[in-house]
Amino acid sequence: MDLIEEIARYRQLSSEELKAKIRAVKTRLGEKLVILGHHYQRDDIVELSDFRGDSFKLSKIASEQEKAEYIVFCGVHFMAESAAILAREGQKVFIPDTRAGCPMADMADISDVEQAWEQIAKATDIKKVVPIAYVNSDAELKAFCGRNNGACCTSSNADKLFKWAFSFAEKVFFFPDEHLGRNTSRRLGISEQELLLYQPELNLGGAEPSQIQKAKVILWNGYCHVHTFFKTEDVVKARKEFPSAKIIVHPETPREVVELVDATGSTEQIIKYVESQPQGSTIVVGTEIHLVERLAKQEKGRHNVYPLARSACPNMYKINLANLAITLERIEQAEKNWVNQVIVPEPIRSQAREALQRMLKYG
Ligand code: SF4
């Protein structure tokens, strides 16, 4: 059957019918199959995943799967790409919808980053600069870091990777998320004056050579629309509504908001923060709404959890029961009928692997 027709037919099925199909394939494939589900996925996808986590935790789990022949990543494309880069010989990685991308990852492409690197090299000694790619980036950017003695990082381990870079170099060139880079730098004691926002559309990123020479961290001007949605007014409103509440946001949130809250943390760190609060606490959380609502449900009776504002990632939402069921059934049916496999060609794969492995080693 044609894939389009199959998708249309599966969309007519109820959630229970689709879940039954997914569970049946899981049972038949057993240890050969592993489903990884990101925290921002819908509840029914999380429920059917073998492992749940943020991108750091899931990339570690993906690299540890010895028996699995098929890894199905329910998240966005760069996450499945990271799993494909770290996969063992013979393992195949799939994503239920290849259109589930990340707009922030698309804000830095390899030609722009290479051009920026050349421009920075004209202003300063490039051997003293370490490129660090947030994992929310294309495989080619990770490969760029791999071949230029750099590394990747996630929002869980950005501090550690920045410290690692500064142990042997003078500057970090960080892309694509300005806000994670800025929040990490400030936490490490780097002042606002030592940060430089690089604007790739302008000559030398819109800076003078002296500014590049002075900068400790050069930040790409990318952002996540889910987390830049949170504004200082949301914090003011939450403080008024819940005066005794703790407020935590994800570090992709702009600096002016971060300065007003009690804590920042990656999705995994947010979960731990909520769980560690004394019984009866109120916690306001600024991150993707599916995670906040799941936390509110899980903590009911122990804590009150509220969203700072409702902000959803539509790309994460592209993964659903219908496309997961079709992907799994096609995996099982016949090799030539595979759909949604994620392949990273060589030499990009090996170079990107080096950058990811440095992250796993030093993060
Ligand atoms: Fe990209 Fe933001 Fe969605 Fe994460 S939440 S996938 S960074 S757009």
Image: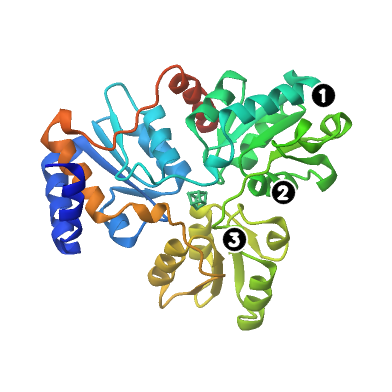
> On the image, which quarter does residue 62 sit in?
top left
Q: Residue 124: x percent and y percent? A: 81, 23
In the picture of the structure, the residue carrying the numbered disc 1 is 123
Looking at the rendered structure, the secondary structure element under dot 3 is strand
The numbered mark at residue 249 is: 3
Looking at the rendered structure, the secondary structure element under dot 1 is helix
| Residue at the right extreme of this rendering | 210
Q: Residue at x 54, y 32 (%)?
A: 359
Badge nearest the viewer, 1 or 3: 1
Which amino acid is tagged 1? Answer: Ala
Q: Nearer the viewer, residue 32 or 1?
A: 1
**Within-10-Å neighbours for mark 2: few <14, some 14–19, many 20+:** few
Specify whether 128 is left or right of 353: right
Looking at the rendered structure, the secondary structure element under dot 2 is helix
Which amino acid is tagged 3? Answer: Val
Disc with the residue nearer the chain's start (2 vs 3): 2
**Within-10-Å neighbours for mark 3: few <14, some 14–19, many 20+:** many
Check the image and tell me how it is coloured: rainbow
Specify whether 342 is left or right of 363: left
Disc with the residue nearer the chain's start (1 vs 3): 1
Specify whether 127 is left or right of 100: right
Q: Nearer the viewer, residue 15 or 163?
A: 15
Disc with the residue nearer the chain's start (1 vs 2): 1
Q: Is residue 124 visible?
A: no
Q: Residue 319: x percent and y percent? A: 33, 52
Query: Is 113 rendered above or below residue 330?
Result: above
CB under 8 Å between discs 1 and 3: no
CA separation, marks 1 and 3?
A: 36 Å
The numbered mark at residue 148 is: none
In the picture of the structure, the residue carrying the numbered disc 2 is 187
Which amino acid is tagged 2? Answer: Arg
